[in-house]
Image (tube, helix red, strand yellow):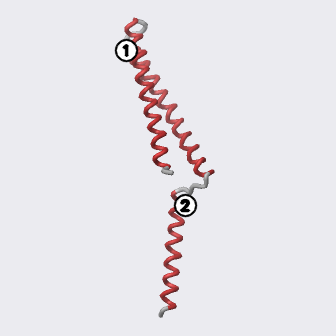
Amino acid sequence: MDNNNLLRQLLMLGIGTTSLVADRLRQVSDEWVREGKVNPEQARLFVDDVMAQFSTDQKGVEEQIQRQFRKVLEDLGVPRQAEVDELRGRIDRLERQVRDMENRLWR
């Protein structure tokens, strides 16, 4: 399982959702301007305010998705990169020790 790829896909889904929301907001605000319900400046401020709030909320959602994703990986027993790196270091040290012992035996 490519964890980075899955996370990237989830983030791209969030970006796509943001884009769809922004497009729909602009359509609605343009319609309100045409109907005379709001002036263009009010429409722009409305879209900006909603998108700012949506962006803030989405960041929280993205952080929550990342936390949940890490928890699922942990529950599945997938080691963190730091754990893998630590094990690689331990293996390297053991291999050196074995080579040193072999070298002593052959002298």
Percent position of residue 107, x then y: 47, 94
Amino acid type at mark 2: Glu
Q: 67 or 38: which is nearer to us?
A: 67
In the image, residue 16 above or below residue 39: below
Kindly state the secondary structure of the residue where label 2 is placed: helix
Picture residue at 45% right of the left edge, 22% below the top = 49
In the image, residue 51 above or below residue 12: above
Picture residue at 40% right of the left edge, 11% below the top = 31
Q: 29 or 95: which is nearer to us?
A: 95
Question: Where does label 2 land, which residue?
Answer: 83
- N-term-proximal mark, 2 vs 1: 1
Question: Where does label 1 land, which residue?
Answer: 41
3D distance between C-alphas at marks 2 and 1:
54 Å
Amino acid type at mark 1: Glu
Q: Residue furthest toward the bottom?
A: 107
Whether residue 32 sits left or right of residue 81 in the image: it is left
Q: Which disc number belongs to residue 28?
A: none
